[in-house]
Amino acid sequence: MGKQDPMTHIVAGNTAPGFSLKSLNNKEYSLATLIERGPVVAAFFKISCPVCQFTFPFLERLYKRYGGDQVTFLGISQDDVKASQKFAKEYGVTFPILLDDEKGYVVSNSYGLTNVPTIFLIDTDGVVRVSSMGFDKKDLEAIGGYLAERKKISLSPLFRPDEIVPSNKPG
């Protein structure tokens, strides 16, 4: 925590850089506005990334369980509209997908991304609570635990007993 190289991603405890991006349906999403109503889970991805393809169905599970009025889930795509729509359909993503490819990955660069997927849980004070690169089972469970506690609902298992899920996959 604290000091970091300019090319590393934002770590837990840091303030998340603000952003405003358009979604696939051209709606504007601003981090400052979203955190006024609750935490934001922002997942950066590229459609060609196999670890992103593996991770997003689990993010969708988290969204179905904990998303809603007071928690926002966002996929932030480094690809164009058409490719991002295809990705969302193929991997069953129903939360908003924003586009960061039109102006040279401005948001991805402000977060210092070096790998995708990179997932951030940003709290209402703008501070990153979870910062996760690649697929990390413990990090996804930590996001679920945090959101369950915040929404005062019981935590439900993210991974089914019949699934063989690795503890992590580098992005």
Image: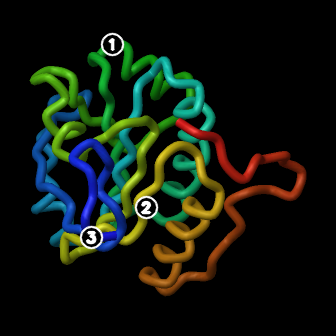
Quick one: label 2, few (<14), some, or many (20+) residues within 10 Å?
A: some
Quick one: label 1, few (<14), some, or many (20+) residues within 10 Å?
A: few
- Residue 79 at x, y = what percent? 31, 20
Label 3's element?
loop
Amino acid type indicated by mark 3: Gly
Which residue, given by chain and number where applicable, does mark 3 sit on?
2
Which residue, given by chain and number where applicable, does mark 1 sit on?
82
Is residue 54 or residue 113 the one in the foreground?
113
* Residue shown at the point (13%, 34%) measured from the top left: 106
Question: How many marks do you count on the picture?
Answer: 3
Amino acid type indicated by mark 2: Gly
Please say if 35 is above or below 55.
below
The image quadrant that residue 80 belongs to is top left
Which residue, given by chain and number where applicable, does mark 2 sit on?
67
Q: Earlier in the sequence, mark 1 or mark 3?
A: 3
Label 2's element?
loop
Amino acid type indicated by mark 1: Lys
Q: Measure how far apart labels 1 and 2 are at the Cα level.
A: 25 Å
Q: Nearer the viewer, mark 1 or mark 3?
A: 3
* Residue shown at the point (30%, 26%) measured from the top left: 78
Is residue 164 or residue 10 the one in the foreground?
10
Residues at marks 2 and 3 touching, judged by CB atoms closer than 8 Å: no
Label 1's element?
helix
Is residue 7 or residue 19 the one in the foreground?
7
